[in-house]
Image (spheres, rainbow, N blue to C red):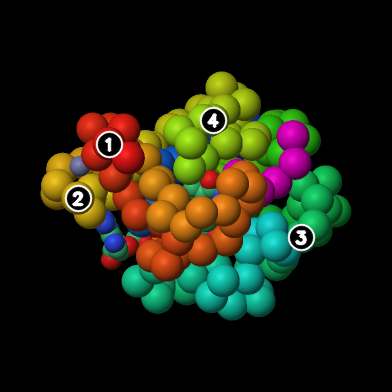
Amino acid sequence: MFIEPFKSGNNTGWIEVICGSMFSGKTEELIRRLKRAQIAKQRIEIFKPSVEKRYHETEVVSHDESRIRSTPVTASQNILLLAEDAEVIGIDEAQFFDAELPNVAETLASKGVRVIVAGLDMDFQGQPFGPIPALLAKADYITKLHAICVKCGSIANYSFRTSSESEKFVLGEQDKYEPRCRSCFQKV
Ligand SMILES: Nc1ncnc2c1ncn2[C@@H]1O[C@H](COP(=O)(O)OP(=O)(O)O)[C@@H](O)[C@H]1O
Ligand SMILES: Cc1cn([C@H]2C[C@H](O)[C@@H](COP(=O)(O)O)O2)c(=O)[nH]c1=O
Ligand SMILES: [Zn+2]
């Protein structure tokens, strides 16, 4: 279980990355951390890429229906403009953002903001996904979560695509993806 670090005396922020496969609990964990920050009366802002509209236009919603309000943005630079006086910033579905997101996170952290980013570390082919590898390199704290393999019940860190689409970006749920362990991911 991730425990929030104490804010250091020199007023710098930090970057937390929550990664893993689909259904591993990334969004639930992001919402948990943000709700705890709200309880601590910290000013929070949440952003998601505007392409991600599976469950709701503006809310971040987990597969299990926990939810929190958010602002959809088209480019990572917009987060700098919209962050205003937030003390804690949450970013979901970060794999869909552009390559500037790691620099945006770093800029915010340098200004004293706690930045919590959640996203898929690998795409359906098991390849590093978008800005997540660079975010992992710049992160102060990393949490890698695992789902349960739908084939054999062991720990899953791959998102297997069951539909025939070959584009990298294909929004979907259980209709198009299933979490699988390494061995079941390789058995096609
Ligand atoms: N195969 C699975 N393994 C683990 N959790 C699953 C699985 N299928 C459905 N779930 C549900 O997904 C929830 C996690 O949802 P969510 O936080 O939205 O995940 P993520 O953001 O990583 O896709 C779990 O609490 C569980 O209820
Ligand atoms: C593996 C993979 C996933 N996607 C899409 C599918 C979903 O819309 C999101 C991931 O959502 P989650 O909150 O992590 O469950 O990403 C994609 O476009 N391409 C892929 O390779
Ligand atoms: Zn398996």
Secondary structure under the numbered disc 1 in the rendered image: loop
Provide the residue span drawn in magenta.
95-99
In space, the residues marked 2 and 4 are separated at their CA atoms by 23 Å
Foreground of the two, 152 or 85: 152
**Residue 175 appears in the picture as rendered:** yes
In space, the residues marked 3 and 1 are separated at their CA atoms by 38 Å
Q: Residue at x 72, y 63 (%)?
A: 50
Residue 87, position in %: x, y? 63, 52
**Residue 69 appears in the picture as rendered:** no
Q: Are marks 3 and 1 in contact (CB under 8 Å)?
A: no
Foreground of the two, 104 or 154: 154
Viewer-side label of 3, 2: 2
Quarter-wise, where is residue 175 in the image? bottom left
The residue singled out by tag 4 in the image is: 128
Q: Earlier in the sequence, mark 1 or mark 2?
A: 2
Q: Report crowding for label 2: few under 14, some 14 to 19, many 20 or more residues within 10 A (C-alpha).
A: some
- Which numbered tag is attached to residue 73? 3
Q: Mark 3: which amino acid?
A: Val
